[in-house]
Image: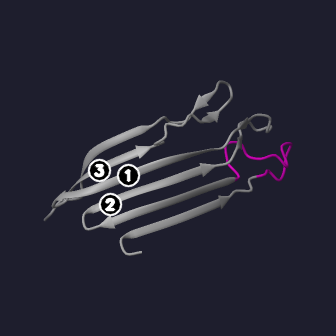
């Protein structure tokens, strides 16, 4: 729609082992369901984007005994053209600063906290 773009994605991963002593079990650390949605606004030298990433629960070990819960994170990014090949950039990951578990064994590890990046980007050299 004019200056707006949108994308939605979904992935189902059937990663069960088919032979050997672990046959029928799920491969650890691979979520069965993954989804994403993103909306982007583009106008002249401005880009602003926001998105949601979601993952279902995963097994943490090869014997499928420990389960890491699913989670979702919200992220934003933006860029503004400043001059010639120079742009200002902004990224915000895990915008709500959600605590989410990515591993239980041998200790509980949580995912990345809120991360903010601000910078300048130079896109190539003129000849």
Q: Are marks 2 and 1 in contact (CB under 8 Å)?
A: yes
Q: Between disc 2 and disc 1, whose residue precedes?
A: 2
Which residue is denoted by mark 1 in the rendering?
77
Could you say which is closer to the camera, residue 49 or residue 65? 49
Q: Quick check: marks 3 and 1 in contact, CB under 8 Å?
A: yes
Find the residue positioned furthest to the top.
107
Of labels 3 and 1, earlier in sequence is 1
Chain part drawn in magenta? 16-32
Give residue 81's position: percent from left, percent from top: 22, 59
Mark 2 and mark 3 residues within 8 Å of each other at the beta carbon: no
Give the residue furthest to the left: 127
What residue is drawn where x is 44% and y is 44%?
93
For disc 3, the marked residue is 89
Q: Quadrant of residue 101?
A: top right
Distance from the alpha carbon under mark 2 to that under mark 1: 8 Å
- Local crowd size for mark 3, using a 10 Å CA cut-off: few (<14), some (14–19), many (≥20): some
Left or right: residue 34 compared with residue 41 = right
Q: Residue at the location (79% across, 50% down)? A: 17
Q: List x then y, in percent, for residue 113.
A: 48, 34
Secondary element at tag 2:
strand
* Residue that mark 2 sits on: 47
Whether residue 104 appears in magenta in the rendering, the answer is no
Frontmost residue, 11 versus 76: 76
């Amino acid at each position: 729609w004019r200056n707006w773009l949108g994308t939605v994605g979904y992935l189902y991963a059937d990663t069960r082992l088919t032979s050997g002593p672990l046959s029928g079990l799920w491969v650890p650390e691979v979520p069965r369901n993954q989804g994403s949605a993103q909306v982007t606004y583009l106008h002249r030298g401005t880009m602003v984007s926001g998105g949601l990433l979601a993952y279902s629960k995963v097994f943490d070990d090869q014997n499928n005994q420990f389960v890491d819960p699913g989670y979702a994170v919200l992220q934003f990014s933006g860029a503004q053209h400043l001059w010639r090949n120079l742009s200002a950039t902004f990224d915000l990951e895990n915008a709500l600063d959600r605590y989410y578990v990515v591993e239980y064994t041998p200790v509980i590890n949580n995912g990345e906290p809120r991360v903010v990046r601000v910078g300048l980007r130079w896109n190539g050299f003129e000849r």
